[in-house]
Amino acid sequence: MALSNLPVGITDGEYLERLTRLRAVLGDRKIDAFLLGATESLRYMTGLGWHMSERFLGAIVTATDLVYIVPGFERSRVESLPHLPGEIRVWQEEDSSSALIASFLPAGGLLAIDDAVPLFVFNSLRHEIPAGQLVDGGPILRDQRRRKSAAEIALIQHAMALTWEVQRRAHAHIRPGLAASDLARFIDAQHRALGAPDGSSFCIVSFGTATALPHGADGEQIYATGDVVLVDTGCRVHGYHSDLTRTYVMEEPTAEFARIWAIEREAQQAVFEAATIGVPCGRLDDAARAVLVRHGLGPDYDLPGLPHRAGHGLGLEIHEEPYIVRGNDLSLAPGMCFSNEPMIVVPERFGIRLEDHIYMAADGPHWFTTPATGPTTPFG
């Protein structure tokens, strides 16, 4: 049975508000138009989700207009998909989509470009528009997208609750002889059953020493009694991601596993407590590493210890700003959402990643999901 109370998707009113904010920036910077590719920023601004391919599809935003740039044979498909109303201009197979894009610029005008478009699109545009008129639009998009609205946070919260329940069911499903691939298929089926129409957006299942590889091992694994279990998975709800990791054992843990698990949880809590409005993102990564060093792990990226950043932003992309990484001076602000996952790797033995996500409100950090409570109690 699907989880109840699915939040509505992003409304046309919110898309229009996003375009209004974008146009205000364009006006302030004297930029004449913004080009969106078939990226998550196109979905963010217009609601149109599209796969990237060798044929350009996207949109031009000007001070007054929203115009979709579409391959001619794809027009009927675009018209059938949810998107903010706007003019559709098509280009045919022998045409240059870049020439069509250039036609929207006044002489000497500036075009900001979605920095997630492929290099071949940018190179084609340079044949039609002088390089001095092309502006990196990535910082403009990131500045807007990294602070989530209440509607976005509600969608992420729903997706997280769904995946939390899937993780709980996966834990109950584990028994000796279970293949990692079978557990991944079970997780996908449970995501679908609970209301994620596309199932798992990703799924990492690791047993035993494979848990020491942060993104999993190639080949099949079979669960055996006493193995460490790491499950990292998520889904999408109206385009917004969930992402949740639990690491545990099904039987009484060894003293070393219990010790490292407790350090991991302490480091995760330190990240949460360091997350206050106005604090640089890098300070949260520092807080996690300080815990590890106090317990004789690390330092820096040395192993046993934390081999990667302590977290990443989440929204329409599974990894986006803000990044919780050493040296990041970006200040935390209300609406930012990010993972808290200061994984500890003990090479060739096991890895422990406890991943929950945080959203920042005016009064500070809030968990999307309740953290694990013990090495055999991943769900309290």
Image (cartoon, helix red, strand yellow):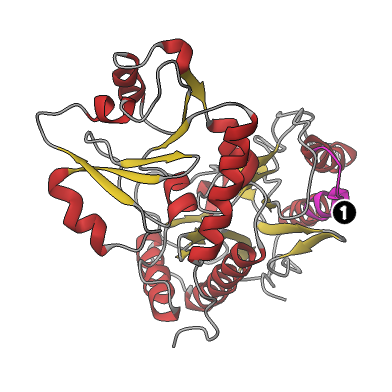
Q: Magenta stretch containing residue 199, yes or no?
A: no
Q: Residue at x 47, y 11 (%)?
A: 132
Res 56 seen here: yes
Residue 181 percent across, percent down from the top left = 35, 61
- Dot 1: element: helix
Quarter of the view holding residue 60: top left
Residue 307 percent across, percent down from the top left = 65, 34
Q: Magenta stretch containing residue 279, yes or no?
A: yes
Stretch of the chain drawn in magenta: 268-280
Q: Residue at x 51, y 57 (%)?
A: 15
Q: Is residue 99 left or right of residue 62?
A: left
Res 177 seen here: no
Q: Is residue 335 left or right of residue 131?
A: right
How many labels sit on residues? 1
Q: Say above or below: 238 vs 60.
A: below
Q: Which residue is mark 1?
A: 273
Residue 4 percent across, percent down from the top left = 53, 86
